[in-house]
Amino acid sequence: MLKAKDIRALSVEEINTKIKDLKEELFNLRFQAALGTAENPSKMNEIKRTIARMKTILTEKENMSKAE
């Protein structure tokens, strides 16, 4: 999905929007997995990691703005 370098180039609002979209996609994948219709179950782990990466970068940006 997105690399850390690409995420850092985004604004805080864009990152929050992407996190929201990924959470919706993760919800849908979990629903499909529960029904047994999931095509690519490993994609759930990839989305979780991307969300965590985005949250980490958001925290970094917040800490940098507080330090300034």
Image: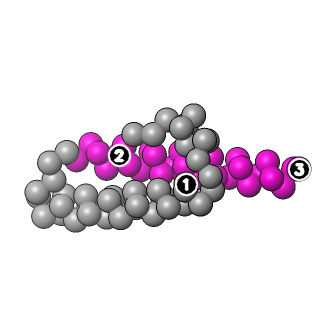
Q: Looking at the figure, which quarter contains the N terminus?
A: top left
State which region is magenta. 41-68
Could you say which disc has been placed on residue 68 in the image? 3
What's the distance in space between the residues labelled 2 and 1, CA to CA? 19 Å
Q: Relative to 4, is 33 above or below?
A: below
**Front of the two marks 2 and 1:** 1
Extreme residue in the right direction: 68
What's the distance in space between the residues labelled 2 and 3, CA to CA? 35 Å
Q: Position of residue 7 (x, y in %)?
A: 55, 43
Q: Is residue 66 magenta?
A: yes
Q: Magenta-highlighted stretch: main secondary structure?
A: helix
Which residue is under mark 2? 45
x 54%, y 38%: residue: 6
Colour logic? one colour
In-front residue for pair 19/34: 19
Which residue is under mark 1? 15
For the residue marked with disc 1, what is the amino acid?
Ile
